[in-house]
Amino acid sequence: MKVKIILLLFFYFGFSIILNAQYQVTGEVYSSGMNPLANVNVILLRQDSTVISGCVSDRIGHFKLNVAKTDGYLLSFSCLGYRTRILVLPPKESDFNVGRIVLDTLEHQLDEVEVLSQSSVRDKDRRIYYPTREQLKYSTNGLTLLQQLSVPFLTVSLVENTVGSMNGAVGLAINGKLVEVSEVLALRPEEILRVECIDYLGIRYGEVVMAINYVIKVKESGGLAGVGYTNFMGGYTRHANFFLKKNHGRSEFGLYYNNHFVDREFVEENRSIYRFPEQVIERVGKSEDNPWKMNINEIKLSFNNREQDKYYFSSTLKGEIRNDPGRTSIYNYEVKGENVPLRLRDSSGQKLKSSSLDLYLERQFKGNSTLVFDLVGSYHDTRVENTMIYAQNGQLLDNLNSSREGDKYSLMGIVYYERRGTQTLLTLALKHAWFDVNNDYVFMNQKSRLSQHITAGCLSTMTNLNSWTFFAQGELYRIQNGETGLSKTEWEYMLHGELAYHFSDHEGVMYGIETESIVPTLSQMDESEYAIDDRIVTQGNFHLKSAQKVRHLLSGQFDYGALNLQVQTEYINIRNYISYVTDRETNRFIYRWDNQGDWRDISLTYWMHWKIANWLLVNGSFAYHDVVSKGEKYKHQTSFFDYSFDIYGMYKNWMLSFSMGEEGNGMNGETRSYGRKTDLIWLTYKFQNLDLGVGMCGFLGQDYKVNQQKVCNEWISSSRWSISTRNIFALKLSYYFSWGKQKEGYEQRVKNEDSDRGINTLK
C-alpha cells in the first residue's frame, strides 16, 4: 500500500512538472484608473513586425499566450480608446509573467466607449476581488469595503467590528501578514488595490477556514492619520479607534489605539433538577436585573520596510488591558417541597494584561517563489474571580470560591515556502509553538503548571488542468503535553483533498474531503482543570482522548448575470469528541460532565448576491443544520436554521444599509445553546474624507438572547438570559487625512515592474 502511495505521489509531481514545461506568456491589462480591461488585443510579433500569434484579454483583464520560444519577440497591446503599448520580451525558455500592463486613455475616443469587466477572478488557491468605483466611494475603511464586496459565506458585523464565516473562523491579513481588525479599520479604501479570499490555507494563517488578504499601495513620504467612533446609545456598546501611519522611503511607522466598551443589563432564568437516591430536588428561580460591563484598551506600534518584488519586513509590538468585572447574579429559588427559598449569589469577573511581539520577514525570489519567516512571543497575566454563595433563611449553606491567578507564556515560529507556477502551486510549511501556563488557586493555596509543545509540518500542492483543479494537502502535528509529574506525547494529522471543475471564473462545482485527528489543546486542558471540584485540584488531564473528525463538502457556484448563487452541503462527523468526567456532590447539588462519544452535523447552505440596479444590491444566506450528539448514556438530536440578509441602496453621497440575521439552536455534548437575533439599519453620508452615520439596532423588536440546557443522568439544568436591544440608536463618525505623495504613480509603477523583469518599454 505504501509503495502505491509513493508511486502516485511521484506520478502527481511528475505530471505537474510536465504541465509547467508548456511555456506561456501571461499578464493582466489595466486602465490608468486601475480598472481591468477586457477585449484588449494582445499580439506577439517578431522584430520585423511579423505576426506570430495573438489573443484578447478576458473580462478581468487577464491574457495568456502559448509561445515555443521567447527570443526577443515584441508584445503589442491595443484597444479602442487607449494608446497602443509595445514591450520587448527578453530571451526566455520558461513560463513568463509580464505583470500588470497599464494603457493610457485617448480622451476623444472614449466618449462613446464603455469597457465592462467582472470585478473578481479565481486564481488557483484564492478568489481576487477588485473593488469597483461605487464600492470605494461608499466605503470608509477596510472593514466596510469588505462588507460591500459580498464574499460568499462571509459575515461582517459593523456592530462588533468582527469578521466571521458560516463555515468557521476567518483570518485577516495585509500584504500576506496576519493582522487584527484594528489595522483593517485603519485601511483607507483608496489604499486597497485588491482583496484576496484565500480558500487553501495550510498552517500559515492558523486554524481558520478562510483568510482575507488586503493588497495595498505604499507611500515613500508623508503619512495618514484618522479617527473612528461608533456609539450605540445607552452604553450598549462603544468603539473608538485612532491610527497614525508615517512613511519614509521604503519604511512605514504605525501607531494604533482601540477601545471597546460594553455596558449592558440582562435578566436570567434558571431551572434545575437534581436526582439523588433518596430524593429529587427541583428549583426554579429568576434573577434580578444584572449589570455587565467590560472595557478593553489596546495599543500597537508597528514598523515595516519593503522593496517591491524582493522583501517585506514587519515588526509589531502590542499591549492590551482587559477589565471585565463580569456580572453578579442573585437568585431567589423556589425549591419544590420547601417553604423557605434558597438564595444564590453568583459572581464572576476577569482582568487580563497581555503583551506580544511579532517579527515577520517575507523574501521573494525569481520564479514566483516566496519564503516567509514569522516569530511571535506573548505574555498574559490573568486574574479570575468566581464565587457562589448559597444561603437559606439567613444561614450560610455553602461558599464556593474558584478564584485563581495565572501567567501564560507562548512562543510561536513558522517557516513557509511557496512556489507559484502557471498551472501549479506548491507550498511547504514548518511550525513550532510552545505554551506554558502557571495557575495559583487563591482559595486553597495550591499551584498547577501546564505546558505544551506543538511541532507541525504541512505540504500542499495544486494543479490547474484546463477547467479542472486538483488540490491535496497533508499536515502532521507532534503535541507534547506536560503537567507536574506527568507528560504525554500525541500525534495529530490532517489530510485534505479537493476536486473542482470551473465552467468559468464565476461558475463551477467542487467536492472536498478532509479527515483529521483532534488532540485537546492547552486551553481545553486548562478549562477542564478549572471545571473540576472547587476544593480539590485533580490531576490527570491526559486521559482526554483524541477525536477523529471527517468532513465532506459539496458546493456549486452559478452566475446568472446580475444574480450570483452558491449552494453547499456539508457533513461533519466527530468521534470520541470529549472524554472527561468529574463529579461534585453535596446535599444541594451534583455536577457531572459526561462523555461525548459522537457528534455530527449535516448542513445545507444557500448564498446569493443580486445586483438589482447600479444603486441597489442584495446579499443573503440561509442554512439548515441537523445535529446529533451522543454520549455514554444520552443521545440528543436537534435541527435549526441560520440566516443573514443585507441590502444596500446608494444615491450620490448617501447610502442606506439594512442587515438582519439569526443563529439557531446549536448543541455540543450535553449542552444546547441558542444564538442570537440581530437587525441593524444605517444611513451614512460621505463627504470627501468625512463619514457620518446614524443607525438603529433592534427596531424589529428582536432581543439578543442566549439559552442553555445541560442534561445528564443525575442533573438537568436550563438557563436563559437575554439583553434588550430594542430601539437602540447609534451614531458613527470617521475622519482621516493624508499628506505626502504616492510612492509610485500607476505609470511609474508599471515601468519599475518592467525594469525589474528586464523589459524595455517602446512607445
Image: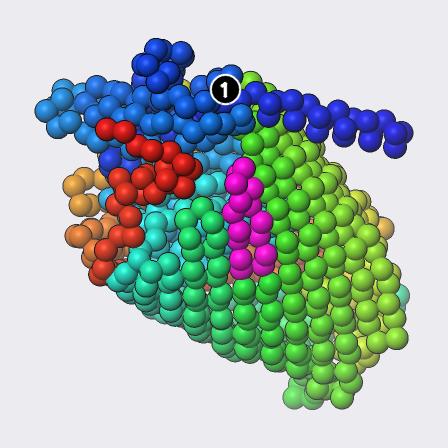
Count of numbered tags: 1
Identify residue for label 1.
69
Residue for point 50% across, 27% down? 92
Q: Quadrant of residue 390?
A: bottom right
Farthest residue toward the left? 108
What residue is at 17 percent from the left and 52 percent from the top?
A: 687
- Magenta span contains residue 362: yes
Q: Amino acid at mark 1?
A: Lys
Q: Residue at x 18, y 52 (%)?
A: 688
Tell me residue 195's x, y (percent): 41, 42
Between 651 and 750, the one lying in front of the other is 750
Residue 278: tell me if it is visible. Answer: yes
Question: Residue at image x 65%, y 22%?
Answer: 18
Q: Quadrant of the N terminus?
A: top right
Whole-percent x, y for residue 743 in the image: 29, 52
Taking 705 as reference, is 538 above or below it?
Answer: below
Please state the extent of the stretch shown in magenta in the rendering: 360-374
Viewer-proximal residue among 96 and 725: 96
